[in-house]
Image (spheres, grey):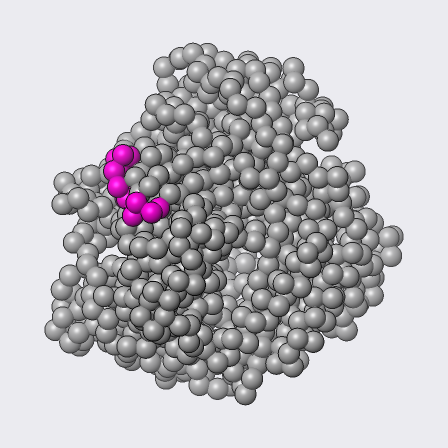
Amino acid sequence: MHDLLTGLLERARQRAATEADAYLVDEQHSSVQVRLGKVETVTHSREQRLALRVFSGKASASASTSDLSRESVERLVDEAVALARLTAPDPVAGLPDPGEFAPAIPDLGLEDPEGHGLTPEEKIAIAQRAETAALEVDPRITNSEGAEFFERRARYAYATSHGFFGSYPTSSFGLTVSPVASANGEMQRDSWYTFARKRARLEAPEEVGRIAAQRALRRLGARQIKTAQVPVLFDPETAASLLRALAGAASGPGLYRGASFLLNRLGTRIAALGVTIVDSGIIPGALGSRPFDGEGLPIRKTVLVNAGTLESYLLDTYSGRKLGLPSTHHASRDGGGVGVATTNLYLAAGEAPPQELIGAVKRGLYVTELIGFGVNMVTGDYSRGAVGHWIENGELAYPVEEVTVAGNLLQMFQAIDGIGNDLVLRDRTSAPTLRLARMVVAGN
Amino acid sequence: MKPARFFEDRFGMTSSLMERLLGSALVGRVEDADLYLEYRVNEDLVLEEGAVKKASRHVSQGAGVRAQSGERTGYAHTDDVTLRSLEEAARQARAIADRAAASAIVAVKPDRRPHDLYSLAVPPVAADLGGKVALLRRIDETARGADPRVRQVIASVSSEEQIILIATASGWTVGDVRPLTRLNITVIAEQEGRREIGTYGGGGRVPFDFFLEEERWKRFTATAVRQALLKLHAVDAPAGTLTVVLGSGWPGILLHEAVGHGLEGDFNRKKFSAFSGRIGKPVASPLVTVVDDGTLPNRRGSLNVDDEGTATARNVLIENGVLVGYMQDRLNARLMGMTATGNGRRESYAYPPMPRMTNTFMLAGQDDPEEIIGSVPYGLYAVAFGGGQVDITNGKFVFSASEAYLIEDGKLTAPVKGATLIGNGPEVLKRVSRVGHDLKLDEGVGTCGKDGQSVPVGVGLPTIRVDGITVGGTQV
């Protein structure tokens, strides 16, 4: 990998590129899907992708290929350099300053070589155990979209014309189950999952299956409710989606284009006092951790929101320079270009057990699933389809569907008046149960 | 360009080699098998802050080998298109089928010939880069010149060429060369501290000059500007169940979400679609006929052959309100005893195919669009939408309006801020009470996601009136 990348950068230099960086991913992926106990699909793949970004003075361009033959790699360089002649110079374009690169590459425990030793039969058995457990929970679990076990093994390498070279391996494993519940002509599906960098850290297949079944069952008998303005609770899964929207608005590319509702809000209150949001890429063994970002800068822990105040944006070098701020080391690579991505993003846990948050609500909605894309990142206007439970006198009364919850993200984060103590880092973005004082729920 | 020749020249993949791969590895052990070779070039140019500062070119190539037996699919893919890698992939794909009882190959050569819907003299990836950059600059100037409130313009031209070759175990081979391009314009306007966004664009399996013809780019730009400015003084959307009039064209995303996904063969074979077992039953008002047609020349959702080599077709899904057909790939058609409809699609060689939509639209009716709006005492008129999503099991779907107006006493009054509409697929089309004579297909911007695979699609709709959809606004 080292030789391939440095050879590429050398060729870029010969072709008159003033600076360049190159990124290589080599991954193997395999998955098994079972449905109603039988094997449905088994896939296996090996892929490589090489991406190059070149600067010709202050103009830049990028190119990528999945063909690593010598001829193709040479063409990649030539095409990128030719494209760079076409683009307009940009005064802030360029690699990070040499002094900023990660001085050492920490071992964050992201790889699990032993975990990959399963035979196809063993992988099939894991998926079957999870699905069988789901099917056995209740006779109303009548069908299944199936269960899938997957594993992915990858190696990332990154090099710059400044002389930086870094590389690291990762593993990931996952199991998802999607049962279908039915009663009285109504069908409802739901799913549950477990993801981990180490296979041994996956939750028991039976447990994942049981939870998936309970999630599908609790939706049976769902009805629409009357349009109302009421307190709304988001369960940890849906609360995490609010966090993803906020992180999107805090990301550099949207900010310097003026396409974010968090523009000019650094240092101001954007959420209730109890809200602290952190992005940490250095948690050992966590799904979003990585030793350096997409530009070779060391990963760290960033407090985005501290007690309601927006303390940091999420920036790569370019968007940081556009905004007159240093990179926050959140660069990500997508094809040849550079974007911004979070690592492990979470909203810090509060004190209240979720039952207590629900218990204090006289009439309100407890949201367990959101669908649709009704989030305007420029204004923060928010309107999405919701599924959940109606709360009546502090108890979950009956399941609800075909309603929307609407508001504005800035006002919504200000309106958080309850934060659960149930934070679990299940995925790259995680949140505890959140209660918002008031939102508009549209129904009939 | 002949795909067979292309893969032979580039990778040495001759027909006898492919036959050997499929033959020795798979014959007699599986019911169906195919080899999918793909070479794709993507080129993107992005203008922001008045200059084209981002340009990129991506090449991806690879091959997928699939073996099927009963309901089982073994799929292996590699980006290394060499005999050794492909033999290994075939071995991996077969591993699953080996567990099944041996049975004869049932894949047969399709009786329909591939179409010729988008041969272009100059495909968009080959068009001059200078011309593309010049167009983006003109769009920027035009948008900024249109109104002083325009603060930011982001315009992009994406071009793609996909060359595929499909070889099946029964010995037939079919290829396709698929051009695709899209122009996208986003405008951000600001007035008294309030910022808003407008987005518009179009494209298809067309040459780059498509954007210059009929001054399309000017219309796209003007529409993006208009949307952003309108929203600056839009009122909050009402919340609750309202009569909704959907404009012609892109609002056809309603069909895509409300019924389209629910009529894909895989969900129905597995019986967890809200439409399972409803063939022959009424699922819409008698005014409604819905078609999925992959054979429209130069459309974004069109294909000469699908990604399994089956020629696309015009498939009627709902006829005068009655459900008459599903969309099928080969696997699900075989297992349901139906015919493959040319809807087997995949994002790339990295994925096995599954039933997907092509261009999905409702046929025109009799009514005058103006009259339809005039017939509504109080409601919402929606003409542009962002994305949508559906839960195919309970049938609930949502889609978000990006340009909408209040209807009061039959007249359009205030523009309304983005609101999400939510409804139930098998019910919503029963409430269609008027269908306009103005069927229009969208401009060519749709991308559909399913199980992590994205494919280009088209939608279309005449102006229709729906008597009751829940509107997710904030005004109670």
Residue at (75%, 26%) from the top-left corner? B9
Q: Which residues are magenta?
A: B273-288
Does the magenta segment cover residue A38?
A: no
Q: Is residue B108 left or right of residue B172?
A: left
Does the magenta segment cover residue B287?
A: yes
Residue B334 picture quarter: top left
Picture coordinates of residue A215, whole percent (x, y): 24, 52
Quadrant position of the C terminus of chain B in the picture: bottom left
Residue at (59%, 59%) from the top-left corner? B201
A375 and A215: which is toward the camera: A375
B458 and B188: which is toward the camera: B458
Does residue A23 appear in this view?
A: no
Does residue B212 appear in this view?
A: yes
Quadrant position of the N terminus of chain B in the picture: top right
Q: Is residue B179 above or below residue A428?
A: above
Residue at (25%, 76%) from the top-left corner? A229
Picture coordinates of residue B64, whole percent (x, y): 55, 31
Picture coordinates of residue A11, whole percent (x, y): 83, 49
Picture coordinates of residue B426, whole percent (x, y): 28, 47
